[in-house]
Amino acid sequence: MGASIIAMFFFTVVVVVHVYASERPDDMYRESLHRDSHLHRMYGIRNAFPKRDSSSVEMRSVQEAGPLPPSGAIVYHVTSYGADPTGQNDSTDAVLKAITDALNGPAKGALFEGIANLGGARVNLDGGNYLISRPLLFPVSGRGNLAIHGGSLTASNDFPADGFLIDLSSSSNSAYNYEFTTLRDLYLDSNYRGGGIRVKNSLRTTIDNCYITHFATTGILAEGGHETVIRGSYLGQRITAGGDPGERSFSGTAIALAGNDNVVSDVVIFSAQTGILISGQANLISGVHCYNKATGFGGVGIYVRLPGLAQTRIVDSYLDYTGIVAEDPVQLTVANTFFLGDAFVLFKSVKGVMSGVTVVDNMFAGSGKGIEIVQMEGKFDQVDQVAIERNAVRGMAVKTTVARASVDGEGPSWTADLKAALLFPNSIKQVQYTFVTDAASYPSHFLRNVSDNKVVIQADATVKARVYITADQGGSYL
């Protein structure tokens, strides 16, 4: 029994010494701990039970007050480097020093080839608000498994107009600069001086629970690389909840995806000229609410600017008085999305190509002014596999690639004029019809003519009949 108690005492003391040593990097203090380890163990045995509560409090206070991370630690507190959490003094050098130490910290193995694994190192902003006078440009590339979190950064009045508060870019010739970098729980105020976050040629970067505002250029720029995930975040040039009197003057872009395979999910964009600008392929936009600038004021919710190769999916989102623009879309899906306030989808012709486009199962709610839900700018000569249908429309004009009509009459011909509903002018590619009559003799009938988006069904006798017609402009579906 006695041996067990003594063993337990020694276990408790070892924990206390470890915590002190790992939170107090001062060399002299560590040397004194080593020199007097026997005294500390005896003191711990004598006081373990009666002072357990006070010892725990003391350990917490030491942890909170630790000035610098010890050798081998993976948490770097910017306040330990002299950063001013009140935002009164310039903290650029201190925060950069913490980031530099983290990037140069201990690594074990590698992630992608050439990317050292930092083991989950964290740069902790300690809940402060730090004044930054130049971009926090990562000084070392080829690193991964790092997080910066938990605080606010504000650009100073002399911050470079073309800079980003956090800049993950590098002049390195490596295939990728960084991998598995996480930026979370951050408030970034660009002070109308440049942008918020830049991620260049990096793999698997996560931007999570961030609030980015007062950008003059771009809130988040993902340039090159792969698989930047932006989620659960809020972006706006001006802080507003809608109906801002200065909405006409909103400028800048909240998110620019100039790379491939990125994801934007559960994000609110509340003010900017353009909500999301996409110039890379194979990106996914999901659960995004854009009310950045009304279309009537010249705003765009989501702009797909990759003529001839979009490969973009926009699903389960909310376009609020601001719509979608796509140039020469090829493989673009817009589905299960709500368009409010006469917001619509606009296809712009660059070389007249539209292929593999689906705008289906969306809801459009407008003001009753006859605004068309899907519009075109320019002429499209190459159209294939386009499906715009099954959209629920209220207060706007339906545009579709699959129009249906029924025509009653006594023949010998029945004409369905589908110009108002069909998207492309004079471009019906397939027709199906059903001929229904109660006449004693059943006449022969056939498709007589398809032109100017009109369908004419002809019979060889005059009978009273109803003809159901479906016309498809979408092209071939094998």
Image (spheres, rainbow, N blue to C red):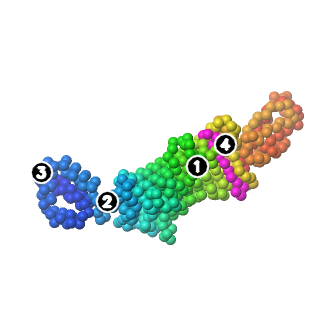
2 or 3: tag closer to the N-terminus: 3
Amino acid under disc 1: Ser
Q: Nearer the viewer, mark 3 or mark 1?
A: 1
Crowding at dot 1, Cα within 10 Å, few <14 / some 14-19 / many 20+, comes out as few
4 or 3: tag closer to the N-terminus: 3
Q: Nearer the viewer, mark 4 or mark 3?
A: 4
Tell me the distance, in whole angstroms, between the alpha carbons under discs 1 and 4. Answer: 26 Å
Residue 344 drawn in magenta: yes
Residue ID for mark 4: 373
- Left or right of 284, for residue 347: right
Tell me the distance, in whole angstroms, between the alpha carbons under discs 3 and 1. Answer: 78 Å
- Where disc 2 sits, the SS reads helix
Query: Which is more toward the observer, 229 or 375?
Result: 375
Residue 295 drawn in magenta: no
Query: Which is more toward the observer, 428 or 124?
Result: 124
Residue ID for mark 1: 249
1 or 4: tag closer to the N-terminus: 1
Circle number at residue 80? 2
Residue ID for mark 3: 1
Q: Residue at horizontal 82%, vertical 37%?
A: 415
Residue 11 in the image, given as x and y percentages of width and height: 19, 56
3 or 1: tag closer to the N-terminus: 3
Q: What is the magenta range?
A: 340-354
- Left or right of 246, for residue 407: right
Tell me the distance, in whole angstroms, between the alpha carbons under discs 2 and 1. Answer: 41 Å
